[in-house]
Image: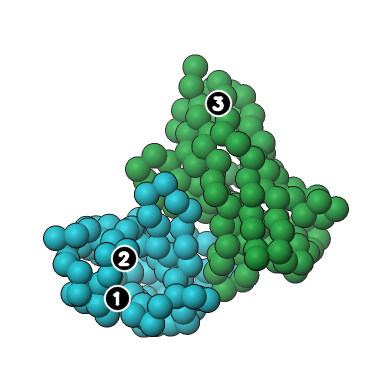
Chain colours: A cyan, B green
Amino acid sequence: EIVLTQSPVTLSLSPGQRATLSCRASQSVSNYVAWYQQKPGQAPRLLIYDTSNRATGIPARFSGSGSGTDFTLTISSLEPEDFAVYFCQQRSSWPQHTFGQGTKLEIK
Amino acid sequence: QIQLVQSGAEVKKPGASVRVSCKASGYAFTRYGISWVRQAPGQGLEWMGWISGYNGNTDYAQKFEGRVTMTTDTSTSTAYMDLRSLRSDDTAVYYCARDSHAAFDSWGQGTLVTVSS
């Protein structure tokens, strides 16, 4: 089973700052990585699919990059509503999927 | 708009079974699969399995093989997830999600299943 490891576990930043979240796979997953945002009491929301494609309605401040085993979600300038938990997901053996353990983005 | 509406919260005793439903609307049900994901309190997301909306083919996470069954009713655009032999560590919020192949692009609101004696 492919394991996804996210870092850091918690990221403390202020509004307006740039956030960089990392997701590392235990073996190559090509570009088959998605990112989700989850706020307390809500279902996850798709942000990015296939490494760098923004989902419908997702603001341009969210971007994704990477390939193989190392992937990054970048939020260029944090808005108050961006503070949440972020999960990466891989689908290289679709329909099997695995998720990372999450990164909590908190207000500093 | 695309909607996935799940059934309500459940409380079950250890050893019992639970069925969670997920009614889809706003898209052609048979053109997409449904994945089920669960989240234990304060924990991350765990993929449980997938079912094709087209032909009912399934693929389960190894951890749940033998204990989970996923089905669909195309006449009502509804997916079902049955989990048997419940244990306390099955206490979680269970989500259904539309699987576009690339990602899970729409999610149900979640169903809390509590397993307690």
Q: Are marks 2 and 1 in contact (CB under 8 Å)?
A: yes
Q: Of helix, strand and loop, which one carries label 1?
A: strand
Q: Are marks 2 and 1 on the same chain?
A: yes
Specify the amino acid type for callout 2. Asp
Residue B26 x/y as whole percent: 71, 64
Q: Callout 3: 10 Å neighbours few (<14), some, many (20+)? A: some
Q: Residue at x 27, y 65 (%)?
A: A80
Q: Chain of mark 1?
A: A
- State the residue lying farthest toward the left: A108
**Residue A93 visible within the image:** no
Q: Is residue B114 above or below residue A95?
A: above
Tag 3 residue: B11
Specify the amino acid type for callout 1. Ile
Q: Chain of mark 3?
A: B
Q: Which mark is residue A86?
A: none
Residue A93 x/y as whole percent: 56, 68
Q: Is residue A36 above or below residue B38?
A: below
Apparent side of residue B13 relative to residue A54 in the rendered image (left or right):
right
Q: Which mark is residue A75?
A: 1
Apparent side of residue B46 relative to residue B18 in the rendered image (left or right):
left
Q: CA distance from mark 2 to mark 3?
A: 33 Å
